[in-house]
Amino acid sequence: MRIMYIVTSSQPMRGPTPALMEAMGKLADREIKAGRMLDTGGLMPVSMGAQVKITDGKLSVVDGPFVETKEMIGGYAIFELRDKQEAVASAKEFMQLHLDHMPGWEGTCEVRLFATPGVDGACQVDAHAHA
Amino acid sequence: MTAADARRTILAVWRIEQPRLITSLSRMLRDVPLAEDLTQEALLAALEVWPATGVPDKPGAWLMASAKRRALDYLRRRSMLARKHQMLARDMEQEQQAMPDPDADLDDDIGDELLRLIFTACHPHLSREARAALALKMICGLTTDEIARAFLLPEATIAQRIVRAKRTLRESGLAYETPRGEELSERLASVLEVVYLIFNEGYTAARGEEWLRPQLCNDALRMGRVLTSIAPRESEAHGLLALMELNASRTAARTDAAGEPILLMDQNRGLWDQLQIRRGMLALARSRELGSIGGFYALQAAIVACHARASTPGETDWPRISELYAELASLVRSPIIELNRAVAVGMAEGPAAALPIVDRLSDEPALKAYHLLPSVRGDLLQKLGRLDEARAAFELAADLAGNKRERELLKRRATEAVRAP
């Protein structure tokens, strides 16, 4: 099953420590070589992006920074894994590195399952097939 | 947490850590099958202890310590006979007692050792079935029970296969050797064959079957990605990876809601997995860069890539596909490849060019009972307006078809061939 990890933190943006960068680099290297990691990327600060919104039936474009943003998404990774247990085990290993190498940091690694119609019986999003 | 949940959690951790455990132990012991035995013991220990204590914060370090302890015990027992082992064991013990570095396990580049592991598991002295079972166990970390369920065989059969294969390796002195240079390329064929066998075993599994079966595709893909990262200069390894990624990209589109197969030309291309297609294309490009455009797997991947590139069936580059089939046919003489070539030629140049190819195959013993031969022939004849002959061909094809749905489809085509086109 395909998994997306999204790392969020409500703390003010600060870059990872060199030790954490190094440890994450090694982990990523191992995961690529093991054939589990398909894609990964870090995201620039939210202030550099934009938001295209619909409110009250109107479309608007807002450039960053955004006052109301509470959670920052720092990066993502896409993995191909066997089951949710493997996904959680992998996320714990990744977060443990933060605990070891960036004391004081708090954040969340969200583990999201891709919706894949018909595969692994993961979920039935093929509603259009019945339409 | 239920006992079953705990077991699944432990097995998940195990699959992540297992390659490093087995490679470290085989380096210590210079014996791959023995290393496998001892890492299995470490897994059993975890299955016994962790449900009570919980999974440790650094499960990899726990498993590694447990596996190394077993290896040291083994070496110590043997060291009664050989002093050098004693010294080796002492060195390692000291090394282990030193301050543990939390990321030491991430530091090891296990590439070479992993390559040795894969080549040992897929040794040409072993049968294909034994190679497949050993590879899934030693490289993907599957349990014997999981392998048995994936191959729809009794667990005892797989267990016996693995035990016998390991004994063969040990007895023939193949327990610890790494092919290099030219030998590596030669031996690689044996590895790729096994990976492709595992992939196809999963690819042909029907929806709703035991979920471990389709999962074999992912196990094979993983092995393919491992191979291309530790043997990055082997063009055919990239070719096979490309072929598998591109074929797997169609998984969601291959069956309808009832689980019936949908032919490639009728598939909803919007369901093709673009991330996987991109990865397949990259692997194919890499394979080309490394020189072989004409390898067995790279050629097949190039054919599948033509389909992947076409966003509608009408955009398919049939002339290119028929060229690629011609190359493939000159590489491997196979009536099935020739029949596929005929289909491509029919699409590229028209039915008149394809019919002679199909007719040349009519005496082929391997295709005597193969319904697709008369089916393809019927299609070409129909397009040429030779309706009586087309009907006879479709009727013959319907008689040969093993699958009810296909039989019905062919019978319908036989009836339709009567009417004016």
Image: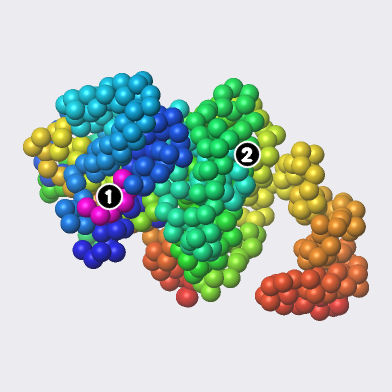
- Counting from the top left corner in percent of width and height, residue B337 is at 76, 49
Q: Where's the N terminus of chain B, which quadrant?
A: bottom left
Q: Is residue B355 above or below residue B84?
A: below
Is residue B47 part of the magenta span, yes or no?
yes
- Counting from the top left corner in percent of width and height, residue B234 is at 58, 30
Give the number of marks. 2
Residue type at numbered disc 2: Pro
Q: Is residue B134 above or below residue B396?
A: above
The residue stretch that appears in magenta = B42-49
Q: Where's the C terminus of chain B, which quadrant?
A: bottom right
- Counting from the top left corner in percent of width and height, residue B386 is at 91, 67
Q: Which residue is mark 2?
A: B124
The local crowd at label 1, few if under 14, some if 14 to 19, many if 20 or more residues have their Cα within 10 Å, is: some
Q: In the image, B348: left or right of B140?
A: right
Quadrant location of residue B165?
top right
Describe the element under mark 2 as helix, strand or loop: loop
Q: Residue at x 11, y 38 (%)?
A: A105
Is residue B101 part of the magenta span, yes or no?
no
The answer to whether residue B192 shows anywhere in this view is no
Q: Residue at x 56, y 27 (%)?
A: B179
Describe the element under mark 1 as helix, strand or loop: helix
Kindly identify which chain the residue marked by label 1 belongs to: B
Way the structure is coloured: rainbow
The local crowd at label 2, few if under 14, some if 14 to 19, many if 20 or more residues have their Cα within 10 Å, is: some
Q: Nearer the viewer, residue B109 or B287?
A: B109
Quadrant location of residue B114?
top left
Q: Residue at x 35, y 24 (%)?
A: B85
Q: Main secondary structure of the magenta part?
A: helix
Quadrant location of residue A37?
top left
Q: Which residue is mark 1?
A: B45
Q: Nearer the viewer, residue B420 or B272?
A: B272
Q: Nearer the viewer, residue B305 or B10?
A: B10
